[in-house]
Image (tube, grey):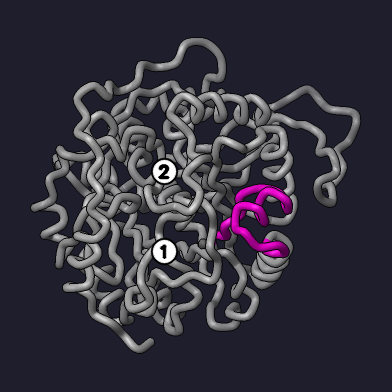
Amino acid sequence: MTAAHSTSCGPGAIGALRTDVPSLNLTTTGLYDPPPARNARRPRQQPESKSVAVPLKQTLRIGAYVLRQHLSGAKRYPLVLMMEPLFRCNLTCAGCGKIDYPDDVLNARLSVADALASIDECPAPVVVMAGGEPLLHREMDRIVRGALARGKFVYLCTNALLLEKKLDQFEPNPAFTWTVHLDGNREDHDHAVSRDGTFDQAVAAIKAARARGFRVNINCTLFNNADPARMAEFFDFAHSIGVEGITLSPGYAYERAPDGQHFLTRRTTKDLFRTLFRLGKGRGWKFTQSSLFLNFLAGNETYACTPWGNPTRNVFGWQRPCYLLGEGYARTYKELMEETDWESYGTGKYEKCADCMVHSGYEPTAVTDTLNHPLKAARVALFGPRTEGPMAPDLSLDNQRPAVDRYAEVLEEGRALLKTDPS
């Protein structure tokens, strides 16, 4: 399972209107080699000059794009193109529902020409390469170069098992970021991906990529067995090895995931993130997401999802309605945007969406809220999400339609559209 499978890849790359949560400081307890020691004597706390997880040029470019769309009155527009050029993976993670396909589908590849044509179709300023494991695609370097040549900001999600081997195929670029899947410390991550040694391999790959001048983020998916104190130590460790930013997400409850017992409910999600953000005050963690999305995770916002904000292109076509939920396919981006029954999906509308709080649907909502309420966003950016007191009311589930198992039907629809490529 790559970053994408853990549901927290790339969409955090929106980053245009993001800010870092104010920092706090705790001591690690020996799960890793500790970060550099801090002086015992502390000066009076001053406002921090913080490095950010998203470069200024990217922030300005995406912010300008969002503002243009907003001022033009566009009802629906994309922020991040999620591209899955293959479903094949070299891990079988317990929480993954993205790769449960027969071999003919797992062996399919999106061709370079089709991938770049899809990037041309969709005006999103950010492109996330997900999967499957993108580095299993023999021409992934060509797809990345083509996306960069088109002026896109590109995030390549990977579990890092092949990263060191493939580094020579890529060149550092301010618009290109590796997003490495790490779900916690050594014990937690290796358990999550069902293979010992993957944590150490990913850490070595991160260090190698940073040594060559690449930008590197990590994405981290949390389930109901996450321990906040251990995750806090892990975030400290991640920054100590040069990671520029962290994309956080609660795991999406994939109906075909091997382990369906550890997904979070909306209430447990909010409680978990409130605890994490309390622990994080003063520690200098840099998240790739907007301040209001983090505020939403902490239970302080009532948001409906924006499924068209992160349209998904995979080997079948354009997936309806969103990156996480496959209920059908469109042949073109235009068809996806204009002919999808968007009102049938989302929390309170469809049972499969009931507990979802993933950034692929809610970060676009938070970005819109930031434009509408910039002072609120600035306040959260300055002081961090509120971690005490009452939570915002949630959307009612009383009128949601029941979940429908459409796997076989949708698989056959996808196969009918499938174009294989020998790459």
Specify few, some or many for label 2: CA neighbours under 10 Å numbering under 14, 14-19, or 20 or more: many
Which residue corresponds to the image point at 67% horizontal and 56% vertical from the top-left? 190
Where residue 318 appears, x then y in whole percent?
Answer: 22, 62
Question: Between residues 117 and 97, which one lies in front from this camera angle?
Answer: 97
Residue 334 visible in this rendered orientation of the protein: yes
Which residue corresponds to the image point at 41% horizontal and 41% vertical from the top-left? 358
Task: Name the residue beneath numbered marker 1.
Answer: 99
Q: Is 197 one of the magenta-colored residues?
A: yes
Question: Between residues 192 and 333, which one lies in front from this camera angle?
Answer: 192
**Element type at mark 2:** loop
Q: Kindly check if marks 1 and 2 are in contact, taking CB atoms under 8 A apart as contact.
A: no
Q: Which residues are magenta?
A: 179-198
Residue 58 visible in this rendered orientation of the protein: no
Q: Which label belongs to residue 373?
A: none
- The residue type indicated by label 2 comes to Ala
The image quadrant that residue 102 belongs to is bottom left
